[in-house]
Image (tube, helix red, strand yellow):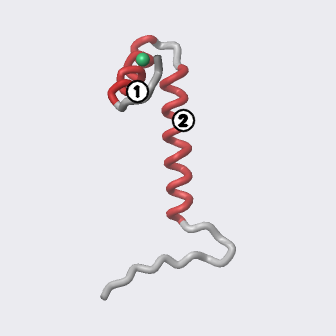
Amino acid sequence: MIASRQTIPAGGISSRAVAVFLCGVLGLGIITLAGNVQAASLHNAAHDVRHANGFACH
Ligand SMILES: [Zn+2]
């Protein structure tokens, strides 16, 4: 049996947790930027993606 074990340094944060956190920050940043940008084409593209994914918006 092959078991993968990730060693976490004492008192530290695992690199996986850091990666998950950074991906979340990046994703929220992209959503915030695309949702609030004033360029009509980028805003419309973000709007279409929102509808395509089933998010309620209006
Ligand atoms: Zn809409």
Q: Nearer the viewer, residue 17 or 53?
A: 53
Q: Position of residue 15 (x, y in %)?
A: 53, 65
Q: Residues within 10 Å of mark 1 (few under 14, many from 20)?
A: some
Residue farthest left in this picture: 1
Where does the N terminus fall, quadrant-wise?
bottom left
Above/below status of 51 relative to 2: above
Number of disc labels: 2
Residue for point 52% across, 13% down: 38
Residue 29 is labelled as 2
What residue is shown with label 1? 50
Left or right side of 48 for 29: right
Q: Amino acid at mark 2?
A: Gly
2 or 1: tag closer to the N-terminus: 2
Q: CB at mark 1 closer than 8 A to ligand 1?
A: yes
Q: Position of residue 40 (x, y in %)?
A: 44, 11
Q: CA distance from mark 2 to mark 1?
A: 15 Å
Left or right side of 45 for 27: right
Above/below status of 17 relative to 3: above
Q: CB at mark 2 closer than 8 A to ligand 1?
A: no
Quadrant of picture, ligand 1: top left
Residue farthest top in this picture: 40
**Secondary structure under the numbered disc 1 in the rendered image:** helix
Q: Position of residue 55 (x, y in %)?
A: 42, 29
The reply to whether callout 2 and callout 1 are in contact (CB within 8 Å) is no
Residue for point 50% across, 63% down: 16
**Secondary structure under the numbered disc 2 in the rendered image:** helix
Q: Amino acid at mark 1?
A: Arg
Mark 2 vs mark 1: in front: 1
Residue farthest bottom in this picture: 1
Above/below status of 1 relative to 46: below
Residue for point 55% across, 21% down: 36
Quadrant in which residue 25 is drawn: top right
